[in-house]
Image (cartoon, helix red, strand yellow):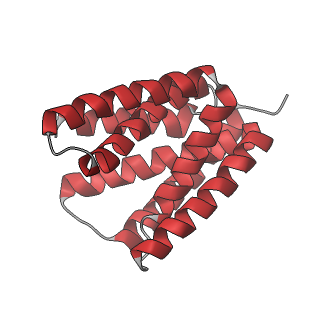
Amino acid sequence: MTIQAIINILIALAACLYGYRLNKVLIAIIGFYYGYQLGLMFLPAITLDGTLIQILSIVIALLVAIISYNMYLVGIFIICFATAYSLCSGLQIDETFRIIIGAVFGFIAGGLGVSFTRPIIIITTSLAGAYLLIDTIVKLVGFSNSLFITIGTLFVALLASSFQFSRNPEN
């Protein structure tokens, strides 16, 4: 088991079980993660220097994390958007349509997250944590099946969100 896998599992469990209570910290951590992934995704179109890509990806990650933490609703929008977009990445359709569908559902989830903060944070952190947990476990065991990942994610997210709703009653 790699250090990255251990970190992923710890973050996933924290998000699943304590996402609402730790939301500002988790929003910053998840903002960092998605900022880093964005850098890795788009910077190779600008430069092929691997070291520069890593450094700039970390800078982008830090900026997104700081924005996510300090601008709470922007952070909520980013995490909801990224979670919905990530869940659509498992769809077995043309890549262009998958990106469009992911973006549409991302904007819808982001808007709902800003409008209905408590339930959306609980659901989103449960989904994000469940996806990260299942995806990490699947990679560790070398088994790759998008249907299994989707069903596993939804099952774990259902359990996690039930736990969070029971522990965080509405004020």
- Vertical placement of 144 versus 70: above or below? below
Q: Nearer the viewer, residue 144 or 71?
A: 71
Residue 58: image location, x then y, percent: 31, 28
For image coordinates 41% across by 37% down, the residue present is: 35
Residue 141: image location, x then y, percent: 20, 57
- Vertical placement of 106 versus 66: above or below? below
Q: Nearer the viewer, residue 171 or 26?
A: 26
Residue 139 is left or right of residue 94, and the answer is left
Residue 116 is left or right of residue 60, and the answer is right
Report the quarter where the C terminus lies.
Answer: top right
Residue 32 is left or right of residue 75, and the answer is left
Whether residue 163 is visible: no
For image coordinates 56% across by 28% down, the residue present is: 68
Residue 168: image location, x then y, percent: 72, 31
The mark tally for this picture is 0
Residue 153: image location, x then y, percent: 47, 58
Whether residue 133 is visible: yes
Where residue 116 sits, quadrant-wise, is top right
Q: Tell which residue pokes out farthest to the front in this image.
A: 46
Where residue 49 sits, quadrant-wise, is top left
For image coordinates 57% across by 23% down, the residue present is: 69
Report the quarter where the N terminus lies.
Answer: top left
Q: Tell which residue pokes out farthest to the right in this image.
A: 171
- Vertical placement of 122 versus 93: above or below? above
Q: Tell which residue pokes out farthest to the bottom in this image.
A: 93
For image coordinates 60% across by 33% down, the residue present is: 75
